[in-house]
Amino acid sequence: MRAGRVTGTHPEDGSGTGPTTPPRAGTADAPRQSAAGTPRRRVDVAELVGIRTRHPEAIAEAAARRARRPLLNESGRLMIVAADHPARGALGVGDRKLAMANRADLLERLCLALSRPGVDGVLATADILDDLLLLGALDHKVVMGSMNRGGLQGASFELDDRFTGHRPQDIERLGFDAGKLLLRVDYGDPGSLTTLESTARAIDAMAERRLPVFVEPFISRRTPGGKVTNDLSAEAVTRSIAIASGLGGSSAYTWLKVPVTENPDDMARVMETSTLPAVLLGGDIGDSPEDQVAAYEKWRGALQLPTVRGLVVGRSLLYPADGDVAAAVDTAVGLL
């Protein structure tokens, strides 16, 4: 038996045709049911740990044999599911402070989301992508490595977004398709200059390898109580886009990952700031069905703009208020 593939059942992909690929590592005998009854792949943590302890080389082997695809398909749109939040200690969704803490549950949700028609790929840190490789969930998907997770949520050094995740050479070595980095600029924090410089050098290193890099820029500040907040006003988002677009020696492989402004009607003017292709981020939209619907409407309008090419959304799709991951993902795909 090849390391990294163990007996079990593979989830249905929602097409009604049943399993189409052989069983992979970490699957148990019966799929869980999601809130709406959609079969959800059941992850066997013990089997995953067994491979990691006895055959750590299986991760590199799985990456080497992964079937790849172009970044964009015929539609020219991207639908990426994001799951790089845990590495920054950001485990909460709405009022659920540790919603993302159960790794098996998160992997099951990701496998279900990735199986839905129209989902192009995933953004995550190495630990999660390694698990997904062992589970065989990344064939024909866009795989995006998260590069800087050093700014831990709530830490005194939160705005020091150091590069603690995938390096450009890791993304190249593993045959992944893109990288993503977070760029938070606080005009009152001299350390933001270091963040800007390290971000520029990361963009250069990705461009040298002809690898796309998705830059997520914010103008940020601390409240009097010390909490870091991102300014989503039209002026602040405009400035963040202008700053991010000019970093590095080449913008040829740079994409932007941007929020919808506080007033969604401002997005048309804001997105005139750059000709770089952009995707919309989801963020923590709240914990009610009404919040979810409002987020869809914001995304719907912004997706009509010429530079906006898709969505990179995580918590609101993986942990929807009603628990129906498949329906949340399908609705988001429909907006494209």
Image (cartoon, grey):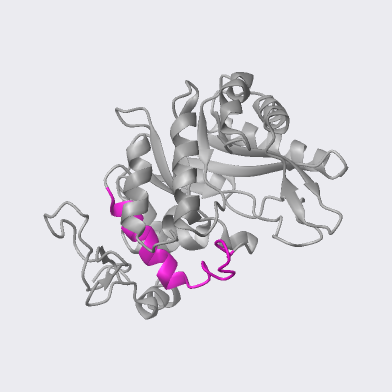
Q: Which residue: 71% across, 55% down?
A: 151
Q: Quadrant of residue 85?
A: bottom right
Inspect the magenta stretch and tell me whether residue 93 lies in it. Answer: yes
- The percent position of residue 335, horizontal first and vertical second, equals 37, 36
- Residue 94, above or below 8: above
Q: How many marks?
A: 0
Left or right: residue 132 compared with residue 200: left
Name the spot of residue 205 as percent of width and height, x first: 61, 35
The residue at the far front in this view is 290
In the rendered image, residue 20, in percent from the top left (x then y), is placed at 15, 56
Front position in the image: 8 or 231: 231
Q: Residue furthest bottom?
A: 46
Q: Is residue 4 magenta?
A: no
- Residue drawn at (64%, 20%) of the image: 273
The quadrant in which residue 19 appears is bottom left
Q: In the image, which residues are magenta?
A: 91-116
Q: Quadrant of the N terminus?
A: bottom left
Q: Quadrant of the C terminus?
A: top left
Horizontal and vertical percent position of residue 233: 69, 35
Which residue does the image show at 49% across and 44% down from the upper left? 295
On screen, residue 128 above or below 217: below
At 67% across and 38% down in the image, what residue appears? 232
From the viewer's perspective, is 82 left or right of 230? left
Work out whether 2 lies above or below 204.
below
Residue 314 shows in the view: no
Compared to residue 63, the image places residue 57 above or below, namely below
Task: Evaluate whether residue 115 shows in this view.
Answer: yes
Q: Observer-nearest residue: 18 or 39?
A: 39
